[in-house]
Image (tube, rainbow, N blue to C red):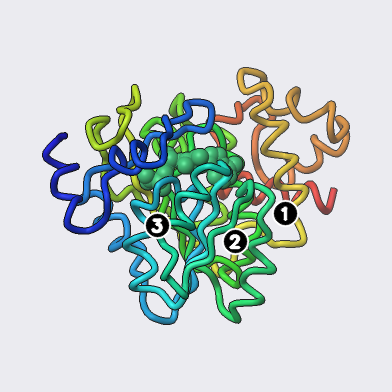
Amino acid sequence: MSGSEEKNRSVFPTARELLAKHGLLPKRSLGQNFLVDTRVQERIVDAARVSGQDVVVEIGAGLGALTARLFPRAASVIALERDASLARVLRAEFAGAANLQIVEADALKFDLVAAAQAAGRPLVVVGNLPYVVTSPVIFATLEAAAGGQVVDRAVLMVQKEFAQRMLSPPGGREYGRLSVMVQQAAETEILFHVGPGAFLPPPAVVSTVVRLRPRAQPLCESSDAGLFSLLVREAFGTRRKMLRRALEPAFGSARVAAALAAAGIAGTRRAEELSVADFVRLAQALAHA
Ligand code: SAM
C-alpha cells in the first residue's frame, strides 16, 4: 500500500480494500483511475467551497473517494455513476448517508436543469472526470449552466493537456474550439496538477484540477448561441484554411464577406488567430448579415 493510500484509512476504506471486498477490478473502458491520494481528495473538495446550503452533483463517483468528503459538508449530494457494480458498492458503503443520493446513470443523460429546479438553487458540480467523456461533460455542463442559474461552479479533474486546451490563448497550437467555447461561457482557472501516482491504477498522463464559473452573461448573447457554436465549429473544422474559405460552405460567400467586413476581420486570417472577442463580434455580424 502506498503512503497516500495508507493516510486514507482513517477516513474511508481505501480503493484497494473496496475493490477486494467487493471482488472488482478497475474497468479501463470507463476511465476507472481511482483517486487514492487523500491530500488531493481534500484539495478538490476544498476547491469546490462546499457549504451546508449547496446541492452537489458528483460526476463519476467511482468508489466514493470524493463522495465521502462531499456529503458531510453539503446540503445534499447526487452521485452519478454509470457502472452498476460501483453504484452497488456506493449504496452499500454509504447506506447511512441520508443526504446522499446514488444515481446509476450516464452523466451525459443527467438533467442538470431539472436538478437545479428541484434544488431551488444553482448546483455545484464536482468530478474526477472519466477520460472518455471529459469533453461532452464539459460542453453539457456549460450548455446547461444558463449564466449561473443552473450551475454556480464546477471543480473538475481532467487531463493536463485538456486543461491547457481549455485555457489556451489565441495563436497557439492548443487553441481551438474547446478554448473558445469554454472561455466565452465561463471563467476558468487551473488550480493544480496531479501526478499519476495519486491514482489506482496510475494513468499514463498528468491530471489537472480546474474550476469553472459560468459567466452570468456569456460573452456571446444567448440569442446568438447556436450561431456562435456553428461559427466556431466551422472555423476550426478546417483550421489551416483562411477564415473566408472555411466559413463559406456553411454560411454562403456573400454573407461571410458582409459579416467579416462588418466585424472588421480580414477573411485571410485563420481561426487560430482570432480571439474569443473576435468570434463574438463575428457571430453578431453573421446574425445581422
Ligand atoms: N470519483 C472517483 C475517484 O475520484 O476516485 C472515480 C473517478 S474515475 C476517474 C471516473 C468514474 O466515472 C468511474 O467510476 C467510472 O465508472 C465513471 N464513469 C465513466 N463514464 C461515466 C458516465 N458516462 N457517467 C457517469 N459515470 C461515468
Q: CA distance from mark 1 to mark 3?
A: 43 Å
Find disc 2 in the rendering and name its residue. 218
Mark 1–mark 3 CB contact (< 8 Å): no
Residue 57 pos. (x, y %): 51, 62
Residue at which label 1 appears: 225
Please give left or right for residue 258 compared with residue 193 in the image.
right
Three-letter code, disc 1: Ala
Q: Which comes sooner in the sequence, label 2 or label 1?
A: 2
Viewer-side residue, 22 vs 31: 22
Mark 1, secondary structure of its residue: helix
Closer to the chain start, of discs 3 and 2, is 3
Query: Is disc 2 in contact with disc 1, using a CB cutoff of under 8 Å?
Result: yes
Residue at x 45% of width, y 49% of height:
89
User: In the picture, residue 245 is in which quadrant?
Assistant: top right
* Mark 3 residue CB less than 8 A from any atom of ligand 1: no
List the residue tagged with mark 3.
93
Quarter occupied by the N terminus = top left
Mark 3 neighbour density, 10 Å: few (under 14) some (14–19) many (20 or more): some
